[in-house]
Image: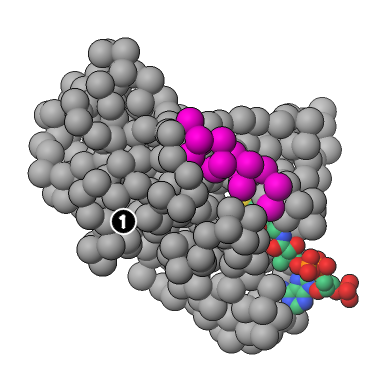
Amino acid sequence: MKTRIIGTGSCLPKTVVTNDDLSKIMDTSDEWISSRTGIKERHLAVEETTASMSIEAAKRAMENANVQAQEIDLIIVGTVSADFVTPSCACEVQAAIGADSAVAFDINAACSGFMFALNIADAYIRAGVYRTALILGAETLSKIIDWEDRSTCVLFGDGAGAAVVRADETCGLLAFDQGSDGKKGEVLACPGRTNNNPLVKTDRTLRYVHMDGQEVYKFAVTTVPASLQKTIEKAGLTAADIDYFALHQANIRIIQSVSKRLHVSDDKFPISLDHCGNISAASVPILLDEMNRKGLLKPGMKVALSGFGGGLTWASAVVEW
Ligand code: COA
């Protein structure tokens, strides 16, 4: 039994903020941002919330998969920016779509969140516990970014992506690799929930994402190609057999470095970071949905997916479409 992706959906906030827009409110430029990252613009939530974008992405994925809410057994949202500590974003999605018999919960694996959700769903499906799952990556990163720190705020955006996965006899997930390195957690961190009882003085700046960009870059360009290589070999394939690589959209230079290390043309690495920026857990499913809706994905194609980021965490998969 395999876990097959049978539908995708995504949702981006209405408001687009270009690099030039940012250069009017902080000391930065389109030239600095685009040349170092490939990012041109990002969508930022104004009216939207993590849950509202998740619900819209979920509905689009269900429509694309032709699946009704009553058929969904499991809902997992990968997120570091849910609207509430509780209820989870997944429970909000469950209520909004009317998936009354589903079990719903969030997971935090930062930018690998959607990939970890896929692996959890796959484990349940292969064990015969559940048949159909709705998995999402959803973020409103703009609420946990320090807008006075130009070295991080220009990199991130908001949005949600979803996929419906189902048990299938013929094709689906062929291989998986995932890992974590908690010892390097501080290179990309957002402390967030500091104590604020009357006995403790809280540093408010601890609410925001901070990052050692160069350390994260080094981690990504070594770990991601190694993880992809391992997963491709587990699937009994070589990098040349992969039709597309759908990578977490952090930085164009990371993606180009992975394509070089795998000796694969960068035409096989579709991009959404130019118009989305880095949306953490939502990056991979949004990219996958864009590829799906452009008609790039044909039955039988082999697609390699990879997410990597805070934790540190990483996860790769090879799927047969
Ligand atoms: N606009 C203009 N200048 C900026 C800037 C901005 N938005 N942000 C930083 N700078 C300045 C810095 O202050 C520094 O100036 P200085 O030399 O006078 O001190 C200079 O640009 C270079 O900064 P540096 O941090 O060395 O740049 P870099 O070449 O390492 O690029 C990143 C920074 C963040 C683009 C790069 O490290 C990176 O992409 N890392 C990976 C990050 C990532 O992908 N994270 C998410 C993973 S999930």
Residue 229 lies within the magenta run: yes
In the rendered image, the vertical position of residue 197 relative to residue 143, given as above or below = above
Residue that badge 1 annotates: 289
Determine the quadrant in which ligand 1 lies.
bottom right
Neighbours of disc 1 within 10 Å: few (<14), some (14-19), many (20+): many
Residue 168 occupies quadrant: top left
Residue 282 lies within the magenta run: no
Magenta stretch, main secondary structure, is helix
Q: Position of residue 256 (x, y in %)?
A: 60, 65
Residue nearest the observer in this picture, 127 or 302:
302
Q: Position of residue 300 (x, y in %)?
A: 24, 46
The answer to whether residue 11 of the structure is visible from this angle is yes
Q: Position of residue 216 (x, y in %)?
A: 73, 51
| Quarter the C terminus occupies | top left
Residue 135 occupies quadrant: top left
Q: Residue at x 14, y 34 (%)?
A: 69
| Magenta-highlighted residues | 221-234
Q: Amino acid at mark 1?
A: Asp
Residue at disc 1, CB closer than 8 Å to ligand 1: no
Q: Residue at x 78, y 40 (%)?
A: 186
Q: Position of residue 162 (x, y in %)?
A: 32, 46
In the rendered image, the vertical position of residue 172 relative to residue 288, given as above or below = above
Residue nearest the observer in this picture, 222 or 188:
222
Q: Residue at x 32, y 61 (%)?
A: 291
Residue nearest the observer in this picture, 25 or 278:
278
| Quarter the N terminus occupies | top left
Please give left or right for residue 304 compared with residue 70 in the image. Answer: right
